[in-house]
Image (cartoon, coloured by chain):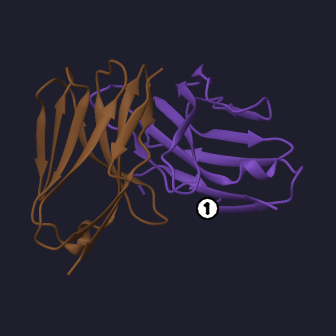
Chain colours: A brown, B purple
Amino acid sequence: ELKVEQNPLFLSMQEGKNYTIYCNYSTTSDRLYWYRQDPGKSLESLFVLLSNGAVKQEGRLMASLDTKARLSTLHITAAVHDLSATYFCAARNTDKLIFGTGTRLQVFP
Amino acid sequence: GAGVSQSPRYKVAKRGQDVALRCDPISGHVSLFWYQQALGQGPEFLTYFQNEAQLDKSGLPSDRFFAERPEGSVSTLKIQRTQQEDSAVYLCASSRGFSDQPQHFGDGTRLSIL
């Protein structure tokens, strides 16, 4: 059974700092997805990682995938307040997505 | 709009009542998914359609939950004899059906059972 774990669960960081969110999954999965969710809102797709070694960047966010280690990371560079949200990773199991519990990120001045 | 549309946004029902939640996917998306999201948790898979065929319903928590997509477009998730533990946000997502594309989520229906 595919399980997905994220850490940390909560992250409070100062503007301008860097940090990484980790996503581990328990069995083989051929796709890894990152989503952002603002309070009371739906999930916004950030990245789709398709293969081992894949790296994608958008603004201050960069995601990578290591399928051998069953690990994906979401790196935040020079955080700004607008990045405050909950971030979910999800691994694909056949056609459905298995989500982690999320990382709640709060960026303060 | 061009996104996934769900209705109603909020639904309050008394325990024991039946409810129906609607999802209108992005036009042309063959795959449609339902997820349940409890407060402070990640979404959990309920069921999946490809066009009108329900290919996976392994996540439906009980036989009180039923989903349909009769014409391969709009889908309805029905919950019979609601219980308090059914209170959650129900999210619908659609995709083109290719794994290199993300699932696009609607805003969800927040269901509260009193």
Q: How many marks?
A: 1
Residue A102 x, y percent position in the rendering: 40, 50
| Residue occupying the point 61% across, 61% down | B9
Q: Is residue B62 above or below residue A61?
A: above
Asked if residue B101 can be seen in this view, the reply is no
Residue B6 x, y percent position in the rendering: 57, 53
Which one is in front, A104 or B94? A104
| Residue occupying the point 40% across, 34% down | A4
Judged left or right of residue B87, residue A101 is: left
Subunit bearing disc 1: B
Q: Residues within 10 Å of mark 1 (few under 14, many from 20)?
A: some
Farthest residue toward the right? B16
Which one is in front, A91 or B9? A91
| Residue occupying the point 11% across, 37% down | A55
Type of residue at label 1? Arg
Q: Which of the image's four quarters has the C terminus of chain A?
A: bottom left
| Residue occupying the point 43% across, 57% down | B1
Residue B112 x, y percent position in the rendering: 72, 60
Quadrant in the rendering for residue B74: top right
On the image, numbered disc 1 is attached to which residue? B9
Asked if residue A107 can be seen in this view, the reply is yes
Callout 1: SS = loop
Residue B75 x, y percent position in the rendering: 62, 38
Quadrant in the rendering for residue B68: top right
Q: Is residue A95 above or below residue B87?
A: above
Judged left or right of residue B111, residue B41 is: left
Which one is in front, A45 or A30? A30
